[in-house]
């Protein structure tokens, strides 16, 4: 069966998993870590860095280090979240050619899916190194409350990374899959997912027969650990300005040091009641005087600074239960997902709301990737024992007279689904209608997301209200929306398949995918060359270690001196090649010569 990897493309960290012998396992990266920071950087020399190595240099290269790209993916340039991000992050966020968001690193401008693709490509490489084979298929997770444009942008990122994304699955749904997999339980479960950048709540029915049915989902795609860090940073900035009269916001390096310190302090306060934030030489004043930032942050102060953020998640949970027509008592298990759920206050507030202690049996950083891998194996299996029934996270409908939004498919409708409504003309002798397809929860059409539009022409002339038009919405299992409109009397019909936009054209995605492939080939070549160099150095070391002994043994033989001389030539040639660099084919010949020489030495000494 073809391998499908599951990737949790996170705001702060990403994780990759695969099913082996029926068991989902998280794949560690080369450093042995099971998660990789979702950070991309470009060095002064133009080298691309991803993960831990990018994080380590963020302070000295803040302007060219991208964090939390997921918060920008699929967003329009004029959205308030983008304005907040511009103020929050040290890298340069610029407007793209399609009113989308782009990021400038050094001299080059990248789209957000391109940045995310770099992280996904790293996940692909980690999986391939572990499995020892090429991987092409993947299931990627995204927040349940992502809209169609954000989902499409996530798919585009996978395509650019050289992956065939066979499904984009909601993060809480993936977590529930991993939680209930193989357990044969009948439970109504709430998955509370508070990660680095987003918040989701999903209510699911898990059946002992392997059916996972999402009942309701809601969330906020711009609420997470990044906002908790920002609250600590604002507190530190205000305190420093009050003490020294200096605003650190103008110094990118100081801000990046603050960001790292805030994140570290937040994490430490999950295990301790108090922590020290100490940043010596944070900035120099005009009088050539270095200033230091030093203060104590208590858990109580952190809870005071972030209490409203936690409350927002609790309010969303309560509303979701109401909309689903469920009582707190109906929920049998609460599963915590995402790094922010390690915060004791978060756990306390969730336990208060649901009147039960959350389950401790899942790893908040790994469970989503595990669920994605399970879904991947289900999709390629001839017969699966698990069935997943997801819902549409947002209401779908059309604009009607007066600029109002008329829903056709309410949020939390199980997909695949189809709904039809009948509308009438609004003017005498109206021969055409324009259908604007929208997604959102506002009664005002303009406040919702426009997904697409088309015109139905050739209507018969008649007084207003007499021509009836059926509008049908269909959503398939992949979340693809198709909309059609039909004149009931004449049968005249027009339709559209709603293709969400990531802000990139198909040509741009194709070019980026090609560029990404070339980078991967170059990287693989570089890794092979590095591996060959390391082997050559090891062989040279072994030969030189054996050399005195071999010289002693063959000194009196007829061909001994010639063999030693030739061995020394082989070593010298290899050393020169390592210093100057040679083509792959020549390095292969050098390695063969070194191996033969070492074999000969070992044979002489046995």
Image (cartoon, grey):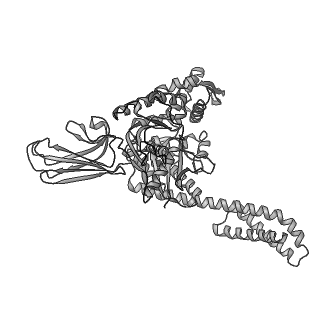
In the visual, does 265 lie left or right of 554?
left
Residue 422: name its quadrant.
top left
The percent coordinates of residue 285 (x first, y second) are 62, 27
Q: In the displayed orientation, state which residue is furthest to the top.
A: 242
Q: Nearer the viewer, residue 99 or 433?
A: 433
Mark count: 0
Residue 150, by quadrant, is top left
Residue drawn 24% across the image and 53% down it: 495
For residue 9, say whether it is visible. no
Position of the C terminus by quadrant: bottom right
Relative to 380, residue 172 above or below: above
Give x and y (percent) for residue 296. Answer: 62, 24
Q: Residue at x 59, y 57 (%)?
A: 129
In front of the other: 294 or 31: 31
- Farthest right residue in view: 556
Residue 488 lies, with reference to residue 537, above or below; the image says above
User: Is 158 drawn above or below residue 312 in the view shown?
Assistant: below
| Whole-percent x, y for residue 292 in the image | 65, 27
Q: Tell me the quarter of the picture where residue 222 sits.
A: top left
Q: Residue at x 88, y 79 (%)?
A: 558
- Residue 122 position within the rendered picture, expressed as x and y whole percent measured from the top left: 55, 52
Query: Could one spot residue 459 in this view of the protein?
Result: yes
């Amino acid at each position: 069966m073809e391998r499908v990897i599951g990737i949790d493309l996170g705001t702060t960290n990403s994780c990759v998993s695969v099913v082996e012998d029926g068991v989902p396992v998280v794949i560690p990266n080369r450093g042995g870590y099971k998660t990789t920071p979702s950070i991309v950087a470009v060095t002064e020399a133009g080298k691309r860095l991803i993960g831990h190595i990018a994080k380590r240099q963020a302070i000295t290269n803040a302007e060219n280090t991208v964090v939390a790209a997921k918060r920008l993916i699929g967003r329009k340039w004029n959205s308030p979240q983008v304005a907040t991000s511009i103020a929050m992050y040290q890298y340069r966020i610029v407007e793209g050619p399609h009113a989308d968001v782009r990021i400038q690193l050094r001299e080059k401008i990248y789209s957000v899916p391109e940045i995310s693709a770099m992280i996904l490509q790293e996940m692909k490489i980690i999986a391939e190194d572990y499995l020892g084979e090429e991987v092409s298929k993947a299931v990627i997770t995204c927040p349940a409350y992502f809209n169609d444009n954000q989902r499409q942008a996530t798919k585009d990122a996978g395509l650019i990374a050289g992956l065939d994304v066979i499904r984009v699955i909601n993060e809480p749904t993936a977590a529930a899959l991993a939680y209930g997999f193989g357990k044969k339980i009948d439970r109504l479960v709430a998955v509370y997912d508070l990660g680095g950048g987003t918040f989701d709540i999903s209510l699911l029915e898990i059946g002992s027969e392997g059916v996972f049915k999402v009942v309701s989902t809601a969330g906020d795609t711009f609420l997470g650990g990044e906002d908790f860090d920002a609250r600590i940073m604002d507190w530190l900035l205000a305190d420093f300005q009050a003490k020294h009269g200096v605003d650190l916001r103008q110094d990118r390096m100081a801000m990046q040091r603050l960001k790292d310190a805030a994140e570290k302090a937040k994490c430490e306060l999950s295990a301790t009641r108090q922590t020290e934030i100490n940043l010596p030489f944070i900035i120099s004043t005009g009088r050539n005087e270095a200033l230091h930032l030093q203060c104590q942050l208590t858990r109580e102060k952190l809870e005071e600074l972030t209490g409203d953020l936690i409350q927002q998640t609790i309010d969303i949970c309560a509303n979701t239960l109401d909309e689903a027509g469920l009582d707190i008592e109906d929920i049998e298990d609460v599963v915590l997902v995402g790094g922010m759920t390690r915060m004791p206050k978060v756990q306390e507030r969730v336990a208060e709301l649901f009147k039960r202690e959350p389950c401790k049996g899942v790893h908040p950083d790994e469970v989503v990737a595990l669920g994605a891998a399970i879904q991947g194996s289900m999709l390629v299996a001839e017969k699966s024992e698990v069935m997943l029934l997801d819902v549409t996270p947002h209401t779908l409908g059309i604009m009607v007279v007066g600029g109002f939004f008329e829903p056709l498919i309410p949020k939390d409708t199980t997909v695949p689904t189809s709904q039809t409504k009948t509308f009438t003309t609004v003017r005498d002798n109206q021969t055409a209608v324009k259908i604007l397809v929208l997604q959102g929860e506002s009664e005002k059409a303009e406040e919702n997301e426009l997904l697409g539009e088309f015109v139905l022409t050739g209507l018969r002339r008649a007084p207003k209200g007499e021509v009836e038009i059926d509008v049908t919405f269909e959503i398939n299992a992949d979340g693809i929306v198709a909309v059609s409109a039909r004149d009931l009397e004449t049968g005249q019909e027009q339709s559209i398949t709603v293709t969400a936009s990531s802000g990139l054209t198909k040509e741009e995605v194709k070019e980026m995918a090609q560029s990404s492939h070339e980078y991967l080939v170059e990287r693989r070549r570089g890794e092979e060359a590095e591996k060959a160099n390391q082997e050559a150095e090891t062989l040279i070391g072994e030969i030189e270690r054996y050399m005195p002994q071999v010289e002693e043994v063959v000194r009196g033989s007829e061909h001994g001196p010639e063999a030693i001389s030739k061995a020394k030539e082989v070593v010298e040639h290899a050393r020169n090649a390592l210093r100057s660099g040679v083509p792959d084919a020549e390095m292969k010949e050098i390695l063969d010569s070194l191996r033969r020489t070492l074999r000969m030495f070992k044979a002489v000494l046995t």
